[in-house]
C-alpha cells in the first residue's frame, strides 16, 4: 500500500479541525509543544497546521496565549460615531456603553520626533516633538479597534493633559482634554478607506491576516486658529464596525 502523501501539517490540521468543531467557543486548543511531541514534528509544522485553521476562521491565535476555538455565531456589529457629546469622556467608551458593551482599552504613550508624514498632517516641521500613543480598544474584553495618535508637544507639552492616558485628566478623549487648555476642536475631519489588515494588526486583533478593515485618518483642528492639534490612524474590523456620520436634529 502506498504511503500517505498528505503533508504532515495538513494531517495535523485535519485532527485539529475535528477537535475545534466538537469544542465550545473559547476552548483553548492543544499547545504547539504538545502537538509536536504527539506527532513527532517540529514546531513549525504545527504552526502551519494552526495557520490553516486560522485562515478557515475556526480558531483564534492570541499572541503569547495560544490558540482558541472561535465562535461561529455572527459577531455583533458596533456603530462608531466620530465623537460623543462633550463631557462624556472617551468617545469610544461612551458609544460602546450606549450599545450595551463594556468598552476598555490598553495604551502606551511616549514622546517621539514627528516623521515627515505625521508632521505634514500636523503642519509642523519634521522632527518636532510629538506625544505618540498606541491604543488597543476592546469590547467585552475582545480586541476590535486599534489606533495610533500623535499630538504636538508645542500644544500640550506645558500642561497636565500631555499624557492622554495618565494624570488627572486621563482617558477623557481628545476633545475634552483640549477644552481644558482652552482649545475647542469641534468635530474631527476623517478620511475612511477600506483595506486588508496587516499581519501585525491581525495578530493584535486575533483574526486571520488580510481580513477587511476600515482605516480612518482622523485629525482634530483648533476651531479658532485652524491648526491641527491631534491626528490619528484608526483601524476597525470590518466585520465588527459600521461608521456613522452626522446626526438627526436634536441628537
Image (tube, rainbow, N blue to C red):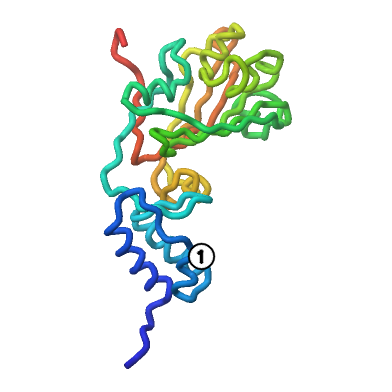
Question: Is residue 203 depicted above or below 159 in this figure?
Answer: below
Label 1 CA crowd tier, 10 Å (few <14, some 14–19, many 20+): few
**As drawn, which residue projects farthest toward the bottom?**
1
Image coordinates for residue 152, horizontal then vertical, percent: 66, 22
Count up the numbered dots. Answer: 1
Viewer-closest of 182 and 32: 32
**Image quadrant in which the C terminus is located:** top left
Q: Which residue is mark 1?
A: 33
Residue at 53%, 21% in the rendered image = 171
Image coordinates for residue 148, horizontal then vertical, percent: 56, 33
The secondary structure type at the circle numbered 1 is helix
Lateral position of residue 163 relative to residue 136, left or right: right
Q: Quadrant of residue 193?
A: top left
Image coordinates for residue 232, horizontal then vertical, percent: 54, 29
Residue at 46%, 46% in the rendered image = 197
Lateral position of residue 62 relative to residue 19, left or right: right
Question: Is residue 26 depicted above or below 138 in this figure?
Answer: below
Residue at 40%, 58% in the rendered image = 29
Image coordinates for residue 139, horizontal then vertical, percent: 40, 33
Question: Is residue 88 depicted above or below 198 in this figure?
Answer: above
**Image quadrant in which the N terminus is located:** bottom left
Residue at 43%, 32% in the rendered image = 192
Question: Is residue 129 depicted above or below 69 in this figure?
Answer: above
Viewer-closest of 57 and 101: 101
Amino acid at each position: 500500500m502506498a504511503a500517505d502523501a498528505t503533508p504532515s501539517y495538513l494531517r495535523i490540521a485535519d485532527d485539529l479541525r475535528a477537535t475545534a468543531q466538537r469544542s465550545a467557543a473559547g476552548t483553548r486548543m492543544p499547545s504547539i509543544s504538545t502537538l509536536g511531541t504527539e506527532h513527532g514534528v517540529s514546531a513549525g509544522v504545527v504552526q502551519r497546521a494552526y495557520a490553516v485553521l486560522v485562515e478557515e476562521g475556526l480558531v483564534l491565535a492570541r499572541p503569547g496565549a495560544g490558540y482558541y476555538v472561535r465562535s461561529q455565531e455572527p459577531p455583533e456589529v458596533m456603530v462608531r460615531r466620530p465623537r460623543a457629546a462633550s463631557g462624556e469622556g472617551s468617545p469610544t467608551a461612551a458609544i460602546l456603553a450606549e450599545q450595551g458593551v463594556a468598552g476598555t482599552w490598553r495604551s502606551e504613550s511616549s514622546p517621539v520626533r514627528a516623521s515627515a508624514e505625521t508632521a505634514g498632517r500636523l503642519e509642523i516641521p519634521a522632527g518636532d516633538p510629538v506625544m505618540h500613543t498606541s491604543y488597543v480598544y476592546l469590547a467585552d474584553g475582545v480586541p476590535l479597534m486599534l489606533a495610533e495618535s500623535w499630538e504636538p508637544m508645542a500644544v500640550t507639552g506645558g500642561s497636565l493633559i500631555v499624557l492622554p492616558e495618565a494624570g488627572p485628566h486621563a482617558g477623557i478623549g481628545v476633545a475634552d482634554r483640549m477644552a481644558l487648555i482652552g482649545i475647542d476642536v469641534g468635530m474631527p475631519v476623517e478620511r475612511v478607506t477600506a483595506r486588508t489588515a496587516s499581519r501585525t494588526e491581525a495578530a493584535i486583533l486575533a483574526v486571520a491576516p488580510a481580513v477587511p478593515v476600515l482605516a480612518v485618518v482622523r485629525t482634530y483642528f483648533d476651531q479658532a486658529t485652524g491648526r491641527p492639534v491631534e491626528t490619528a490612524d484608526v483601524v476597525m474590523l470590518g466585520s465588527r464596525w459600521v461608521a456613522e456620520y452626522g446626526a438627526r436634529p436634536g441628537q
